[in-house]
């Protein structure tokens, strides 16, 4: 299996580092940004930014190519690599999450409260009945009456 080599074993990374060192600069703006565009063409910081950007792109492509190869040749290793960051984050937050109560524990602490019955109220429109589409509870002559309409019903005189 071919893996990206560490910078100390990577001839291209070493060459790029040597080129930047030879320019005699220690800091430079990000390639393509406003500060980079403001530099004169012969400013060595401009060249250093180009070397840095090229090396970052080369390393990015090498990693992407390696993942593409693994997806075809070794799907288990591919999966391990693409989920490594998420697994590390999960391991990091697991202790804190384990201390939090679950939804069931929160409900148990709150105690059981039975659902409130649907009740029509005087002076208000009929109430929609949950679980019975199109049906509404009306208050007619002091009684709760379920009807397939939401139109106010006249009360008996």
Image (cartoon, rainbow, N blue to C red):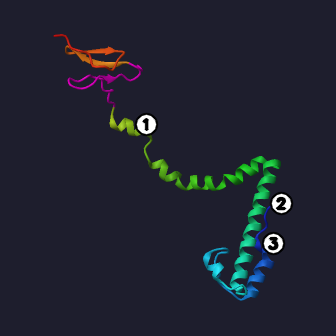
Q: Position of residue 93 (x, y in %)?
A: 52, 54
**CB within 8 Å, label 2 to label 1:** no
Residue closest to the far left: 157
Residue closest to the far top: 156
Q: Is residue 48 left or right of residue 110?
A: right
Residue closest to the far bottom: 24
CA–CA distance between discs 2 and 1? Answer: 48 Å
- Mark 2, residues whose alpha carbon is within 10 Å: few (<14), some, or many (≥20)? few
Foreground: disc 2 or disc 1: 2
Q: Residue at x 61, y 56 (%)?
A: 88
Q: Residue at x 79, y 77 (%)?
A: 14
Foreground: disc 1 or disc 3: 3
The residue to which callout 3 is attached is 10
Asked if 80 appears above or below 130 in the picture, the reply is below
How many marks are shown on the rendered structure? 3
The residue to which callout 1 is attached is 104
**CB within 8 Å, label 1 to label 3:** no
Q: Residue at x 75, y 51 (%)?
A: 77
Q: Is residue 85 left or right of residue 152?
A: right
Asked if 18 appears above or below 119 in the picture, the reply is below
The residue to which callout 2 is attached is 2
Q: Quadrant of the C terminus?
A: top left
CA–CA distance between discs 1 and 3? Answer: 54 Å
Q: Position of residue 147 (x, y in %)?
A: 33, 14
């Amino acid at each position: 299996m071919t893996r990206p080599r560490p910078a100390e074993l990577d001839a291209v990374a070493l060459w790029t580092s040597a080129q930047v060192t030879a320019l005699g600069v220690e800091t430079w703006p990000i390639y393509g940004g406003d500060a980079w565009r403001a530099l004169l063409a012969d400013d060595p910081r401009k060249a250093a930014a180009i070397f840095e950007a090229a090396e970052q792109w080369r390393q990015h492509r090498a990693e992407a190519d390696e993942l593409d190869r693994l997806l075809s040749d070794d799907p288990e290793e591919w999966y391990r690599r693409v989920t490594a960051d998420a697994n590390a984050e999960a391991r990091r937050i697991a202790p804190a999450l384990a201390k939090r109560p679950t939804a069931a524990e929160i409900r148990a602490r709150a105690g059981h409260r039975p659902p409130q019955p649907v009740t029509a109220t005087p002076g208000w429109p009929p109430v929609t009945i949950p679980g019975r589409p199109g049906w509404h509870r009306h208050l007619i002559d002091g009684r709760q009456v379920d009807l397939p309409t939401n139109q106010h019903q006249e009360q008996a005189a």
